[in-house]
Image (spheres, rainbow, N blue to C red):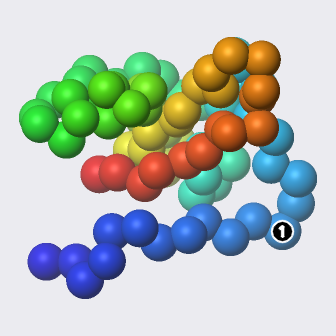
Amino acid sequence: MHLVDCRVVVVDKPFDILPGEVRCPRCFGKDIVPSMPRGLRDAVMRLFGGIPRHCRFCGRRFYIRWPRGAGGKSTGLAEGR
Ligand SMILES: [Zn+2]
């Protein structure tokens, strides 16, 4: 069991997420495919605007959060499994 499930993904280069251009937080690959929501966690994440995605390159599963409204600066990543 993990101690904390909110590790911060540290990046050393600009990491701008644009709609339609999502990159994997681990390998920065662009081979991202939608992941089928499963379990209670995804249901909760969806309530908060989290969309499950799956990296086909490294197999990383993560959530993306589309910016709401015209802000666009609240884009965040939440790691998932
Ligand atoms: Zn990846």
Residue 17 coordinates in the image, percent (x, y): 75, 34
Mark 1 nearby-residue class (10 Å; few <14, some 14–19, many ≥20): few
Residue 32 vertical placement versus 81 (above, below): above
Residue 36 placement: quadrant: top left
Residue 30 vertical placement versus 57 (above, below): above
Q: Is mark 1 within 8 Å of ligand 1?
A: no
Q: As drawn, is 5 to the left or to the right of 28? A: left
Query: Can the viewer see residue 23?
Result: no
Q: Give the camera-side residue of 56 and 14.
A: 14
The residue located at (68%, 48%) in the rendering is 28
Residue 75 coordinates in the image, percent (x, y): 66, 38
**Label 1: which residue?**
12
Residue 13 coordinates in the image, percent (x, y): 88, 60
The residue located at (68%, 70%) in the rendering is 10
Residue 27 placement: quadrant: bottom right
The residue located at (31%, 77%) in the rendering is 4
Kind of residue at badge 1? Asp
Query: Can the viewer see residue 27?
Result: yes
Residue 48 coordinates in the image, percent (x, y): 39, 32
Residue 46 placement: quadrant: top left
